[in-house]
Amino acid sequence: MAIDTRKAGTEAQGPRASLLNDPKFRALAYQILVVGAIVAIGWYLVSNTLNNLARQNIATGFGFMDREASFAISESLIDYSPASNYGRAFVVGLLNTLKASLLGIVLATILGTIVGISRLSSNWLVARLATVYVETVRNIPLLLQLFLWYGVVTESLPHPRQALSPVEGVFLSNRGFLLPAPVADPAWLWAIGAFFVGIALAVAVKVWADRRQAATGWQFPTLRFNLLLILGLPVLAWMLAGAPTVMEVPELRGFNFVGGISLSPEFAAILIGLVVYTASFIAEIVRSGILAVNYGQSEAGLALGLQRSQVLRLVVLPQSLRVIVPPMTSQYLNLTKNSSLAVAIGYPDVVSIANTTMNQTGQAIEGVALIMAVYLTISLAISLFMNWYNKHIALVER
Amino acid sequence: MAQDTGVGSRSVERPPVLSAGPLGWLRANLFSTWYNALLTIVILWVLLQIVPPMADWLVLSAQWGEGSQEACRAAGGACWSFIDEKWRFIVFGTFPSDQHWRPTIAILLIIGLLFVSSNRNFWSPWLGLVWVVGMGLVFGILYGGFLGLSFVPNTLWGGLPLTLVLSVVGLAVAFPFAVLLALGRRSDLPFIRAMCVGFIELIRGVPLISILFMASVMFPLFLPTGVTIDKLLRAQIGFILFAAAYQAEVVRGGLQAIPKGQYEAADGLGLSYWQKTSKIILPQALSIVIPPMVNTFISFFKDTSLVIIIGLFDLMSTAKAALTDPAWRGFYREAYIFIGLIYFAFCFFMSRYSQWLETSLNRSRRH
Amino acid sequence: MTAIQTSGDGTTPGPRQLGDEVAIEMIGVHKWFGEFHVLRDINLTVHRGERIVVCGPSGSGKSTLIRCINRLEEHQKGKIIVDGTELTGNLKNIEVVRREVGMVFQHFNLFPHLTVLENCTLAPIWVKKVPKAEAEATAMHYLERVRIPEQAKKYPGQLSGGQQQRVAIARALCMNPKVMLFDEPTSALDPEMVKEVLDTMVSLAETGMTMLVVTHEMGFAKSVADRVIFMDQGEVVEQNEPEEFFSNPRSERTKLFLSQILSH
């Protein structure tokens, strides 16, 4: 290690020595050594594995995916029965993972933003409570929190017969949460259609308002109008279609409820747990993002005569978002990865299904590989998006 | 503020009552605007609904000290008798009960090591040796089998000592790998860089649980026929891989924070790559990354709770196991609060320490 | 306005002839930060077209004084009337005043996510509801006045400190303010950039703009100011026309301050 390449290089020496001291040769040699060592270790492990598999008569490959799964899955977004194959079971698990993650991301962002802003509130009580929330939740393992929420749902809530009903038609029991569902009627389809039309119109209004403002200076209350458009149009469509109000209210039949929309206790626990935990991290990101914008920026905006809301929208937010978005994405990724803890409370996510499959078929390598492939795909997609986004919004400096 | 003696000669005028004193504080902090006032009142009302019943459950109606579960259910509050009955099992797991002093000493040793390491006066290469000796003692006292100590296989270890051993050993062993990975990721050698990037991103892209699955079901297949490794070691290796990838990214952050001039100065002095790295770059980079490193340790400490899924008896598992006792069913809140407090105590102190360290390091760097 | 402009370039000694119109009036203004009394009984009348330099040791309250004028700081006692509008808790009044009063900060406070041109058009478009093309034309006009029209498409981070401060002046001028406040506009600049900013301010003064300038640049005070105000410990200790102020300070505290600041 102590050979000085510079000195050796300047002195006239034999060809052998100069080759050893040639940085290019050294670089190549190092790399060949390291790569060789890793390939050797890898080959050793693979050959051991193949030996062991052959000895235990375990088939390799993904052929098992076509075989009948013969286990039941408690909740599924697509048709599934124990007669379906393992491949379909995986899809069910993947969809369940995505369901919990996407809902979790939306709710955690909302809660986290509220808590983060609350930590900066001028109201002492609000700021204190937000701090206590963040400090407590961050310092307790997520798994423990999941168990606690699951315990609260399954053990502390009453049986369906004595279900709590905080609002008419909503029931909380140890079999999960039940919400009323609208009875199928074309009016609901109209309303959903109107919602998307509303979004399209809102975009059009925004473009029109921006052009109009550029040309005449005349400002249109785009935000308020569009909100009204997106929310009001579905209501209008629903009313025009006859305003059906028949709801399918969950009904107690025998020992459990029938009808309505139901959230299983497992799903409720994983969702609450992920949201509460991740929100505490998002809160810190939002807080530091806001603090990262120098107060002088707000002052300059105010001094120019902008209103507080305009300062927030035109000056502070565009700058905070640049600070907030990258760590926020990694929290989204963490939430998605943490949804794998669902296996501990029996929510059938992709890890849980893979686990069952591994136990039934003994195809451990394929199972673990599938889990990893799923999460790597999600991670890679998100980081590609992030790189693009970061380049897009980076502040121009000299 | 340039205040001098001139103030004393003038009559001191106090701010109007509304902007100072306790009243001023209340107005500024709780009732500054109508919506703040409304918010304050709503929150106070909600707290009034929640806090008294909670305090009642936690303290007033709770059953303290020894007692039966019937007494607990009659009392209607928290059943601390359950903890009184089970705390030894939760903290020490299935370790032989007449030998509980041994895991106690192990816990104290690890806490002592952490405490010593937190003091900046002790930061030196010698600290590494202290850790090796200290952890040797920890394993010695847990395994036994010498000086009349009975041998206790690690399948009987459990509870807090296991949680601490997993996290501390995982982090300590992963650290040198992390440094190498971070250096590799910034290396000019394309193959080495590609492999380091590949490893780091692979591990960071998948959930810890899949790595633990891999460790528990795939590692045995990797070994030659007839060789087995025990469950604890497999989980430990999984943790080391995981920790190495995350720490590598922290170390890389430190390496990136070193000004380019430092590299150039070292090159200018004619130092070789390893001299430059070990004498100039790493000492600076590592001192920068200590606070984020402590944060990694905190999340890592929390993550050890996942070993319950592959069937190891850490603090979380022992608490769950204690709950399966048919005589004490349904006291999950008490159990979770108890271990929650243990986790919280460790994590909270470590996070406070990392904040303190960061400000004090910043301060000393500026002078 | 035109009368003022011509008289400003007239014979050097003696005060310029100023209009009777009052631009800013402060009556018995007090302010506290917590228990700390930063402004004590400030009484100040600024006439239209008047150029005032406020100086004093750091912590004397001079920045706070001018920040009270566009209510970046709230005073707790007394009255501040800007261009006939009294500053109270009323948000409408505050908006009105901020439109009429431009401000230049020590640290520029340009918006880093907007180009130089966008920095200048932001407030005209959103506050004055000016069409974009018109706002851009105005902005280019003022950027030419501060002599950096060629930087219009760049971002603040690409400019030097002196250029940034000139953009900040242009940005404030784009709102056509009646009064301009300068809060130590040259303190954060490298020495070689101070002059370009001061030159811009001098040429602005020549247009008859009402200006309140917190600065330690005594050369600027001597050549441009109609009146110099010396503050210490939250009080206006002394005010006078520059000639008299510098040659014949009355208070001991002023003498001490001047000896410290002029000794280099």
Image: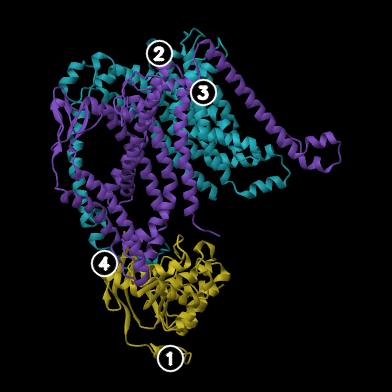
Q: Pointer 2 and pointer 3: residues touching (CB < 8 Å)?
A: no
The residue identified by callout 3 is B237
Q: Pointer 2 and pointer 4: residues touching (CB < 8 Å)?
A: no
Q: Which marked residue is nearer to the observer: mark 2 or mark 4? A: 4
Choose between C168 and B47: the one closer to the eye: C168
Residue C198 is situated, as x and y percent measured from the top left of the image, at: 51, 76
Question: In the rendering, what colour is chain A?
Answer: purple
Say if labels 3 and 1 share a chain: no
The residue identified by callout 2 is B95
| Subunit that carries the residue with mark 3 | B
| Subunit that carries the residue with mark 2 | B
Q: Pointer 3 and pointer 1: residues touching (CB < 8 Å)?
A: no
Residue B328 is situated, as x and y percent measured from the top left of the image, at: 24, 17
The local crowd at label 1, few if under 14, some if 14 to 19, many if 20 or more residues have their Cα within 10 Å, is some
Q: Earlier in the sequence, mark 4 or mark 1?
A: 1
Choose between A190 and B107: the one closer to the eye: A190
Amino acid found under the numbered disc labelled 1: Ser
